[in-house]
Image (cartoon, grey):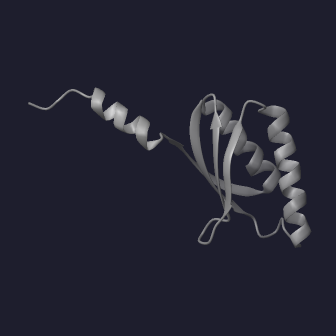
Amino acid sequence: MQTFVMLTRLSTTILRSLVSYEELENNVMQHIRTKCPQVEWLANYAILGPCDYLDIFRAPNHETALEVCTIIRSFGHATTEIWSAVEWERYKELLHQLPKKS
């Protein structure tokens, strides 16, 4: 499984009340669970700044991560940014496998 970090900014026109946030979340997550059952959610944060949410999840491949983004964009009337991520310990292992400079 690969790790992905996603920033989401919701459209101001989609949310009229605080209840809408929960309804939106329930609808989006239901579709993701149905279409992408192999996705594992690691963390979800409401954040300050130009985006509203930061999500961290694992997916088997980039195509599945793209599907998650597309669901969020279409149901949440949102914009998203997504990046693949490597845990720091794994990154250090990869560094040790690189050829040494002479």
Q: Where 70 falls versus 13 (above or below)? A: above
For the residue pair 97 and 73, the one nearer the viewer reads as: 97
For the residue pair 75 and 88, the one nearer the viewer reads as: 88
Q: Is residue 71 visible?
A: yes
Relative placement, left or right, of 97 versus 51 is: left
Residue at horizontal 90%, vertical 58%? 23
Q: Is residue 16 visible?
A: no
Quarter holding the N terminus? top right
**Residue 59: x %, y % from top left:** 65, 33
**Residue 47: x %, y % from top left:** 64, 67
Q: Quadrant of residue 39?
A: top right
Residue at horizontal 86%, vertical 57%? 24
For the residue pair 79 and 54, the one nearer the viewer reads as: 54
Q: Where 82 falls versus 60 (above or below)? A: below
Relative placement, left or right, of 3 versus 79 is: left
Q: Where 81 falls versus 37 (above or below)? A: below
Residue at horizontal 77%, vertical 33%? 36
For the residue pair 74 and 101, the one nearer the viewer reads as: 101
